[in-house]
Amino acid sequence: MSRLIVLRGSLVAIIFAATGVWVCARQVTAAAPGTAPQAGAPSQATTAAGPQAADKTATAYAQTAEQARILRRFEAEAITNLRPVLQVEVAFMQRICGPSAEQLRQLKGDRKKQLQKIAEELRGGQFDFDDPWSKLRPVARRFVQRKVATWVHAHLSPAQAHRYESEIERREAKIRDVCAKNFVAAIDRDLLLSAEQREKLGAELARKWDSEWTMGVVNGLMQRPRVFPKLPDELVLPYLDASQQARWASLPKQDRASWGIQQDAFLGMWPELDDKD
Amino acid sequence: MLGVSRRVRDLAFAAGLFGCACLIRLGAGDDDHAPTKNRAQAHVRLMSVSPKLVDSYIYAEHRDETGCREWLDACLRLKVNEIGKLFGLSQTQKDKLELAGKGDVDRFVRRVDELKGKWQPRRVPQAQFNAMARESWPLQQLLGHGLFESGSLFQKTLLTTLRPDQAAHYERNDRERREYRNEAYVELVVVQLDAILGLSDGQRLRLLQLLLDRTRALRGSDQFGPRVVLAQMSRLPDDTFLSLFDPGQWRQLKLKLATARSTVATFKQLGIVFDDDLKTGDKP
């Protein structure tokens, strides 16, 4: 009888233990790397940099706990999203400057720390707690480029630095030209511009192109060809005749197209990441 | 006695372990089966269809037929005035063109109405919904491309209205416009690829020249501009690009081209004809 009691007791204990093991296993799986982070939760990158460090920098700007949370989240998003941007820019710099092995060693440094620093600098002192990314998204890539440029100036020769900067400038100019041209091509369907109008308007817009309009052309027009980025009338109207001006006024326009950080940075493309980096 | 007791304990322990394993398996099994269940549910997922949904797919930002007609009428008036100014057309000629254009609009709206007839309010399985949605693509594309382009009543009337020299002038203007647009798309593809490949200025120029030489505006490709350029690019032999890129860039580009190649079938369904599909002697 007593044996039976012992046996029953062992079985109950084992079942309890098994349930405990199962619950623990599920919790571990849920927290395992590779699972999607919860919205608002700091990413692994932030945790890796040290939660206390993140708190310290965040509270330097934040007035409330909620603001500190927003800042931490911003930094985590910046680190995650700017990593591929930095990777592409560093590869570009290597291609252009051809650094020696020693120069490269100095340049590469600690990628995590570099990203943390970029994230902190990107948010700057003028942080918009209501919509942190709206102003920063279109400039994030240029910000990373500038950061790489400072490393290039610090570690490479003046000739290499000059080569890098001039390539960046040419690339930026090309983006402005191409966006202006695609905008003109899009409105041309509706406004039937002459060749001269196309040329003059295209040149004017390329000179005054604002990066905030870029994604409206690159992604916006390609998905909704009849909804135009809202460019200032004073830039467009001088090149149109009266009937075209009236038509321009009636075209549907979108103030600012909102896309993801990487969509903006890679102009709607997506690089395949080298995880070893 | 002691041996029997130990055996019973061992047996109990083994049974406990087995129970434990079953319990863990059961717990894990819940999760393992979840996607299967979801997949099965997704398989029979029902989607609502209605004529209003067709409006939102095809008329999109114009909301409905009325909005779209207003916009198309404005487009037509502008086009007729522009051509009238360019070639000094009489009012009668302009009226004739406008009538032809309105015929194109009516024809388009009729096609949308026919589609709406098939989309009477009900719930259909996801697969059927997708097939129905695909039927709306050519109409979306037609509207995006423009109702008064080649093949339209407007265009046919125009060519019979104009004198041969005027028609040639018009076609030259139209060709220039299409070339400008195609060049814009090609350049856009180059800067987009540049964003992920990190091209030097020299590479950018060489790639641009290559694409301008080897791709062109395809019939009906306007709405998908840059994507059709990429699809054309994906059909060029690999060795076309090898001298242009370093191994890292080529690795990236190959992945992009593979994705672009998979869009070719869809574009063909939409009526876009690729150069290398043409038999000798066919006109693009």
Image (spheres, grey):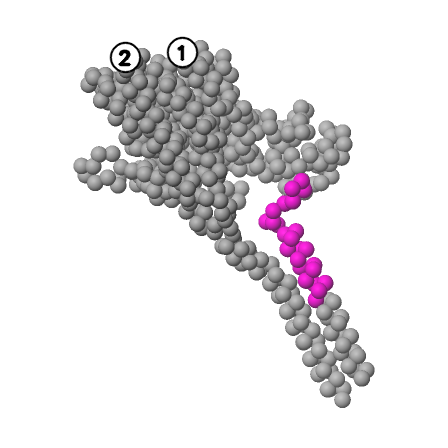
Of residues B4 and A254, the one nearer the viewer is: A254
Q: Report if residue A29 lies within the magenta region.
A: yes
Magenta stretch: give its range. Answer: A18-42
**In the displayed structure, does residue B14 sit left or right of residue B236?**
right
Q: Are marks 2 and 1 in contact (CB under 8 Å)?
A: no
Q: Can you say which quadrant of the picture contains the N terminus of chain A?
A: bottom right
x 34%, y 15%: residue? B81
Within-10-Å neighbours for mark 1: few <14, some 14–19, many 20+: few
Within-10-Å neighbours for mark 2: few <14, some 14–19, many 20+: few
Q: Is residue B177 positioned above or below A90 on the image?
A: above
In the rendered image, residue A55, in percent from the top left (x then y), is placed at 73, 36
Q: Which residue is mark 1?
A: A241
Q: Can the viewer see residue A61 in this picture? A: yes
Q: Which residue is farthest left?
A: B281
Q: Which mark is residue B90?
A: 2
**Dot 1 amino acid type:** Asp
**Dot 2 amino acid type:** Ser
Q: Is residue A91 positioned above or below B14 on the image?
A: above
Q: Can the viewer see residue A149 in this picture? A: no
Q: Quadrant of residue B171?
A: top left
- Element at badge 2? loop
**In the displayed structure, does residue B252 sit left or right of residue B272?**
right
Of residues B95 and A219, the one nearer the viewer is: B95
Q: Report if residue A173 lies within the magenta region.
A: no
User: What's the chain of the residue with tag 1?
Assistant: A
Of residues A195 and B229, the one nearer the viewer is: A195
Q: Is residue B218 positioned above or below B90 on the image?
A: below
- Element at badge 1? loop
x 78%, y 82%: residue? A3
Q: Quadrant of residue A136?
A: top right
